[in-house]
Structure formats: C-alpha cells, structure tokens
Image: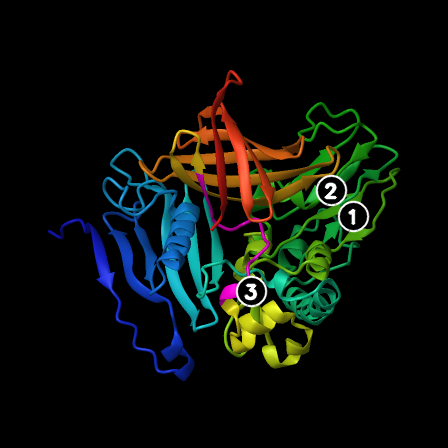
Amino acid sequence: MKKTLKKIMILVCELMLCQSSFSQMSIKIERLCTYVDDSSEENNAYLNFPIVSCKDSLVIEKINTFLQLSELNLLKGKEKKHIFERVFQEGDNNSIAQGKVVMNYNLLSNTKNNFSFKLDETYQWATIEYWVAYYNFNPQNGDIYYWQEFFDDTNRKKFIDIVSPLLVDLVNKYIRIDTNINVEANDIDTINKKESRFFYNQKEIKTDSLNFVISTPKYMLNLEGSIFLYDKDTIENPFNTPADTFYINPQLQYSFIDTIMNNKSYIIAKPLKDSTIDTNIYDGRMEYIKDFSNELTNCFYFTKDSIYFDIFNDLDKHIRCDFDTTIVGVPIEKIKHLLNDYGYSAMINGKDLEKFSSNSERQLYKATTNKGKEFYFTYCKTYYVEYEKKQYYYGLLIMKDKGTFYDLSDGVEENGMIVFDFEDEDNKNKGKFALKREGDKVSGIKTKKNNKQQFSFLGKKM
C-alpha cells in the first residue's frame, strides 16, 4: 500500500545558466523549501519557496525577510514544523486542507540589474481563489522595483499610452460583447446557443414598474425554470430594491448566477408590456479598459529585452480561463527614451544602481521599540472609499526575536499618522499601531485596547 507522502524537502539548486548576462548575477537561489502532500485529492498541496543568498548580507536580509513576511507570515528559523505552517493547515479525515495549497516558483530574470520571479498561488477554504504574485528586486541594494518609478510624470503617461492599447486589445480579443437585446426572454434554446456576453448599464435602471424578466440558462438557476419575474407587488425581492428601481450589474454573478460567466452565457433583461426600461448596454470590457488607461496593472516583470504586464489578477476569476494568455510585452528599445536615470540604470546599464532608492511605501522597514525589541514591517495603500473620502492602508509586522506575526489592517490617516488595527495571527484585536513616515525614517506608537501606550518605536526603510 502506498504510504502517504508528506515531508519537507530542501532542494539545493545549482543554477546552470548559459546566458552571458546571467554570469554577472548577484542573487543566487540558495535552496527551495518545498512541502508536498498527496495523501488525498482534497488535501493535495504543493508549496515551494525560494531562499536567496548573495555577497551582501543586507541585501540577503531585505529580500528574504520581505518575501517571508509577505508570503509566509513567518521568518525562516522560527517555524515549528515547516515554513509554510502559518499559511497552510493540513487536512485530516474530518476536514480538507486550508490556506495556500499551491505555491509555484518561477524564475523570470536574474542579472546584475534585476532579480524577478513569479509565484502562482492557490488558496483553499470554503471556496478556491488563485492569483499570481510578481517580485522584482534591485539586486544591488535589495529594494523592490515598481515600474511607476522608472519614469517622470510626463513620460509615465506616454509609457501608459504605449502599453494601454496592448492591454485593451487583449481584453477585446477574449471578452466578446453581444448587443442584441431582441431575443425573446423565454427563448431558452436561443439563449443557450449564445457564446458571448453583455451587461446592462451598471447605473440604476428606472422603470414605470418593476416588471421585467431576467433570463438565463435554466440549469444555472434552479430545477423548475429559468425565468424570474419581479414587480412592485412581488413579496419576494432578494435585492431589497425600491419598487421603482432595479439594479443590474456584474455583481449579480456573485449571488444567484455565480457560474454564468464561466460558461460563456449571459444575462438578458427584457421589459414586459406596459413597462419602460433603459436599454443602454453595459459593456463588460469598459471597467478593465478604464483601469488600464490610467494605471495599467501592478503585476509586471522585465528581462534584459522587454517589460511585461500581466492582467491575470485584474480579471474576474470566472473569465480568466477564457484567456490563452494574460501577458503583453513591450521591447525596452521602444521605450528607453522615456526612462529616467533610475529606470535606465535598472533596465539597461546598471550604472550606480545601488545608489537608487525606491520611494514606494511598500518596502521593508526595520524598527526598534523603546524597550529594545526589534521588528520588521511593510505596508501599502489598498483602496480609496469615495463617500468616506478616506485612503485605506494594509500592512504586515513580525517581531524579530520570537517571530510573532501581526496584521496591520484598516489603516487610515489621522493627525498626520497612519493608524492601523493591530491583530494577531488569530485575528484578535490587540489595539492600535500608529506610524509616521518622513523620507526613509519611521516612528510611531503601539497602544493597547484600552488606549494605553504599550511601546513607542523608531526605525527606517532598510
């Protein structure tokens, strides 16, 4: 009988690279820490994670600590069983494996200018989520690269204008829109034959009454039928909307039509007699096109020849499988005239690269409390809430001595500081963490739940 394979393997990687530029690489993959569990289909897990080394001890500390904090919530050497134990929980006879069940490492570039790799990750819980994570490091000082910093404001817009049409073409190629709304609402056979998608205007649709039909393939909704009627006299209104207003938008897929997008079907909303409805079509591509026209995507990497952008994470998970590729590339030769000194050094000649320091907040910081305890943290902007007029932040923190991990959640700006909820690994609130950044220096205080100060701290970007 085949025994369960469940072990930790340390794979020592001797990188045999033939490209001449790689002979000048400064980062080495010391080993891949790998966890494998194939005991059952539900508990399948394959996780591998790089540990890097180089001649510069500070660069080693910066890259390894940032990656381990960001991806594992744990520092190597502080684990009890293996380094994945905080992001992956093994299953048993009564439960499935939970957390990150897949983490595949892919080296993309390793030169004196750039160390880039990709992680393909899958998270399993009540549902399954999957994403890609790209990391690009300056191997001369350990900073994380962000493409936005390679251009001044004017040339950044010119660069976006070059890349944006490529992303738009990619979206247009794989998301097809059908603007024909003259199909009879109850013509299920015709609906089932359609292979394209459309949405109505995402804004509210006002009607004389709430009489209209949402029709989808019947097997998607229930066993009895496929037509849903709602009017102002209907008691059962799952959306709790006013009698004269109904909203049709892509968020419907998260309620009762979860799998429609994945099956290349679509929604038809057709007014019944004595009703009027705004039949403006909401083009499912436009949200993506709008985003890519302003800021592209944060998932990128570059090699000695080209810079690449990947829209995988930007797409709804139900349509990702429709794309043969989610990556576009632009030759560096085509955009080199737009680069600032930092960008030119990083992407082309490597001159004085160790002297360039990233201004992005998402770097690694090291601080010391007034009680002499050292810790690492990182943070970044997450989302902006328009009606609150608030920018939110998120961060991660880990104590150096014991490796205790904390979430810095729901950060908002207050009195010149960013104030976070301070939560332990069990999501229990442990008070507030407030920080102030001035250039590369950081300072702040940690308070308990009763608002009493627990410690103050001083630190800097590493």
Q: What residue type is labelled 1?
A: Asn
Viewer-side residue, 273 vs 132: 132
Q: Position of residue 7 (x, y in %)?
A: 20, 50
Residue named by callout 2: 248
Q: Name the residue under label 3.
A: 323
Please, what secondary structure does the residue beneath circle 1 have? loop
Q: Do the residues labelled 2 and 3 touch (CB within 8 Å)?
A: no
Q: In this view, does 56 lie above or below 409?
A: below
Residue at x 41%, y 39% (from the top left corner)? 375
Residue at image location 87% in from the left, 38% down from the top:
275
Question: Which span is picked out in magenta?
Answer: 354-367
Q: Position of residue 193 (x, y in %)?
A: 63, 59
Residue 57 picture location, percent across and down: 35, 58
On the question of residue 256 being in view, the answer is no
Task: Give me the C-alpha separation between circle 1 and circle 3.
Answer: 25 Å
Which SS class for mark 3? loop
Give the residue pinned by disc 1: 201
**Quarter of the image where one finds residue 213:** top right
At label 3, the amino acid type is: Phe
- Compare marks 2 and 3 and give the one earlier in the sequence: 2
CB under 8 Å between discs 1 and 3: no
Query: Callout 2, which amino acid?
Result: Ile
Q: Is residue 356 magenta?
A: yes
Gap between marks 2 and 1 measured at Cα: 7 Å
